[in-house]
Amino acid sequence: MQYRNSMLISGRLYAKMMLLFFSLFSISLQAQSWLSYKLTPRGDTINRLDQQKMKQGPWVLRFETLRGEPGCEEEGYFLNDKKDGAWRRFSLMGDLIARENYKGGYRDGKQQYFTQMGDILREESYKAVDPKNPYDTIMVPDLDHPDRMLEKVIKHEAAEVKNGTWTYYSTSTGDVVKTERFVFGQLEKKGPPPVIPQRNATKDTIAKPVQKQLPKAVQDYEKTKKKGKG
């Protein structure tokens, strides 16, 4: 029995040593492909620079407080030296203050920003634009035929444009205080409110503009002027 137990212990020790060996061997192979990198306490490689000095894979960026601007830490992924996918930003105290999404180094899709207390502050929406192909196609009404739509090609002037719904929240109650909608960088304008006919209103009174009451001094002047002409 004692011999059997010693064999089991030796087998487990051997397995652990082999696992450690292969882990170190794997890290060694990875290290040879990176110009520089950092190791986390778990042994994961982060902040990698490839042989072309481009950021690749998971990164943690730290910005110290400078000229009154609060510092922060950002974590996410780089692809060929450009931010890509989901990123998170934290205060230096560790509080989550932003969730952002990137495509090719530019914000794309839904973004969320929070107060230092963790309350939602606002939600933004962007569209990332390929600088090599800054064109998009939108549908616009045909002025000659209102029931038809026409394709219009537009050129974006920036690499990321506001596109979609922006929502602003009250920091005290969390209620929505304002919403805006952007279409390729242009704020969508809301039309005038529709005229609602009142019950029993005649054709002449519907949507009839309200006449402003002139000040008394102006009324007296107009009366004097009319009498002079008479």
Image: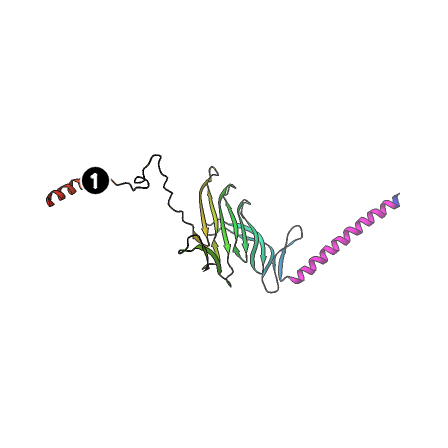
Decide if residue 124 is on the left or right side of residue 86: left
Q: Is residue 155 visible?
A: no
The magenta segment is 4-33
Q: Is residue 25 visible?
A: yes
Q: How is the image coloured?
A: rainbow
Q: Is residue 118 above or below residue 186?
A: above
**Image spot of residue 121 (x, y percent):** 48, 43
**Image spot of residue 144 (x, y percent):** 40, 56
Decide if residue 229 is on the left or right side of residue 118: left
Callout 1 environment at 10 Å: few (<14), some (14 to 19), or many (20+)? few
Q: Amino acid at mark 1?
A: Pro
- Depth check, front residue: 218 or 100: 218
Q: Residue furthest top?
A: 200
Q: Name the main secondary structure of what is drawn in magenta.
A: helix
- Depth check, front residue: 125 or 81: 125
Q: Residue furthest bottom?
A: 52
Q: Is residue 5 magenta?
A: yes
Secondary element at tag 1: loop
State the residue position of label 1: 215
Decide if residue 89 is on the left or right side of residue 197: right
Q: Residue drawn at (47%, 47%), measured in percent from left and top?
A: 166
Q: Residue drawn at (69%, 57%), measured in percent from left and top?
A: 27
Q: Is residue 23 magenta?
A: yes
